[in-house]
Amino acid sequence: MERKINYLHLRKQPYGIFERTPEIDYDSGAEILYVSSHELPPDEIWGSYNPITHTIKINRDLSEDKKRATLAHESGHALGINDEHQTDLYAAYKIGSFDFVRQFSRKPG
Ligand SMILES: [Zn+2]
């Protein structure tokens, strides 16, 4: 008789059963957190990158398009690009549309 093992119970749960698996930006390896606006630095209302923790925070209340553009922008910072214009160029490359990114390019952070 075949024994069935439920591997789900055997798998290690490094982040705890009730916490979700972290979302990772695969280009930079940074962890992505979707947070409320008060969890962002006061001058960065859409998103921020923290180089100490290698974490990208995105305002969870943004539209899906704005989240996507902001994540691509912060991904550029996570790769070490500091200049805002260069970061937007990287975001345009990552998304594949400069027009898409340009809609959201005039922002701090
Ligand atoms: Zn920026």
Image (tube, rainbow, N blue to C red):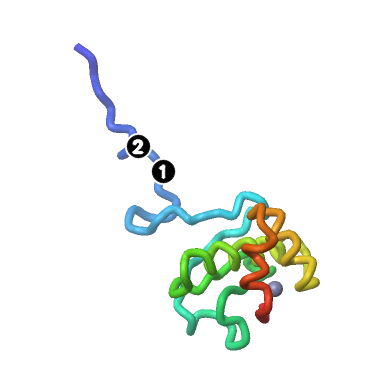
Q: Residues within 10 Å of mark 1 (few under 14, many from 20)?
A: few
Image quarter hosting the C terminus: bottom right
Confirm or deny contact between disc 1 and disc 2 (CB under 8 A): no
Of residues 96 and 76, the one drawn nearer to the viewer in this rendering: 96
Name the residue carrying label 1.
Answer: 12
Amino acid type, label 2:
Leu
Question: Is label 2's Cβ within 8 Å of ligand 1?
Answer: no
The residue at 61%/81% (across/down) is: 44
In percent of width and height, residue 34 lies at 47, 68
In percent of width and height, residue 58 lies at 53, 70
* SS at badge 2: helix
The residue at 63%/67% (across/down) is: 53
Distance from disc 1 to disc 2, alpha carbons, whole Å, reads 6 Å
Displayed quadrant of residue 60: bottom left
Image quarter hosting the N terminus: top left
Is the residue 29 above or below the residue 10 in the image?
below
The residue at 78%/71% (across/down) is: 85
Of residues 107 and 30, the one drawn nearer to the viewer in this rendering: 107
Name the residue carrying label 2.
Answer: 10
* SS at badge 1: loop
Of residues 8 and 82, the one drawn nearer to the viewer in this rendering: 82
Is the residue 26 above or below the residue 5 in the image?
below
Q: Residues within 10 Å of mark 2 (few under 14, many from 20)?
A: few
Amino acid type, label 1:
Lys
Outermost residue, bottom side: 42
